[in-house]
Image: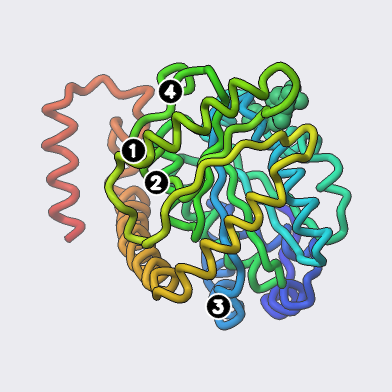
Amino acid sequence: MRQRLSIDDYTNGIFSGDRFVLSRAITIIESRLSQDRNLAKLILKNILPNTGNSLRIGITGIPGVGKSTFIEALGKHITSLGKQVAVLTIDPSSKKSGGSILGDKTRMERLAHDPLAYIRPSATNLSLGGVARNTRETVLLCEAAGFEVIIVETVGVGQSETLVKGMTDFFLLLMLAGAGDELQGIKKGIMEMADAVAINKADGLNKMATDLAVHEYKNALHLFPKSDSGYIPQVISCSAMENTGITNIWEIINDYQQTTKQNGFFEKNRRLQNLDWMYEHIRQTLETMFYEKPAVRKKDWYNRKNSECGPGIAYCSSRKIAKSFL
Ligand code: GDP
């Protein structure tokens, strides 16, 4: 195990915007070693007063829609305005495909070299719930390190969108023209979550199809119930590759921020998100405590691979332990 820094070194390093220390602190947050858990708690406690000041943007879309190309274009636009941007990724499939750490950095090479940007892929060896908890806490660390805009990217495969929506202020759905909703695996629920839909790859021969898709999605969104934010979701086209439509999307994001800050939704949403986060934290803490019990660890179903017990036995056994635990 790599040598840990002192709590002061982590805190001061993060406050001074030291990327190296920030990365090491995120590693502590992601660590599942019990000795790191206390350190993670202390780091979070120290930095908490300096958090909450960023604009948190969630971006989703199926693989190949152009997320990394788009985030690079948007990220470069944001840094050109002199703002610092952090990009965090949640990739539920990375467990299967192997480490995404190098992959994400090379996917956004220009942005990775921008001194105002920071890119951090999620740890690959965790459950989706674990990744989500880490990502929330990573957002806080990045805020304490001075990042004004935080982009959380997720691959559009279902559950992860809800998690990202639950930790961001603005949720952008990237889509393609002519691929059909079903083909894109985008469920109605995900469309409903979006504050804006951007049809990407509006270039070359695809331009006309994109204009048509914008029209169709505008009509579709019209039929959805009004969002709690009081903001009417926007549909636009863009080409991440040709860098067109990117400034429009940034303007929409700012417009959304202004509207929801004025009508009080921005703060209300963050308060509700914090509450959900607390419930989630309680659930996870109890779960960890349960599975750490020596009596639980001894059970053959603890190591599911070697378990031959039927569901009935597992149920009774876990109930007995849960009872003794309470
Ligand atoms: P991701 O899997 O969603 O992150 O998608 P990528 O950003 O890796 O892009 C997938 C492919 O689409 C790559 O070959 C990109 O060059 C291409 N691509 C991304 N954005 C655009 C765009 O705006 N126009 C066109 N024509 N191609 C694009």
The kind of residue tagged 2 is Met
Q: Which mark is residue 189?
A: 1
Measure how far apart labels 1 and 4 are at the Cα level: 12 Å
Residue bearing mark 2:
193
Kindly indicate the quadrant of the structure image that contains residue 271: bottom left
**Local crowd size for mark 1, using a 10 Å CA cut-off: few (<14), some (14–19), many (≥20):** few
Label 1 close to label 2 by CB (< 8 Å)? yes
Q: In the image, 228: left or right of 153? A: left
In x, y percent, where is residue 114? Answer: 86, 53
Quadrant for the C terminus in the image: bottom left
Displayed-image quarter of ligand 1: top right
| SS under mark 4 | loop
In the image, residue 113 sits, relative to residue 241, either above or below, namely below
Residue bearing mark 3:
48
Mark toward the start of the polypeptide (1 vs 4): 4
Q: How is the image coloured?
A: rainbow
The kind of residue tagged 1 is Gly
Q: Residue furthest bottom?
A: 49
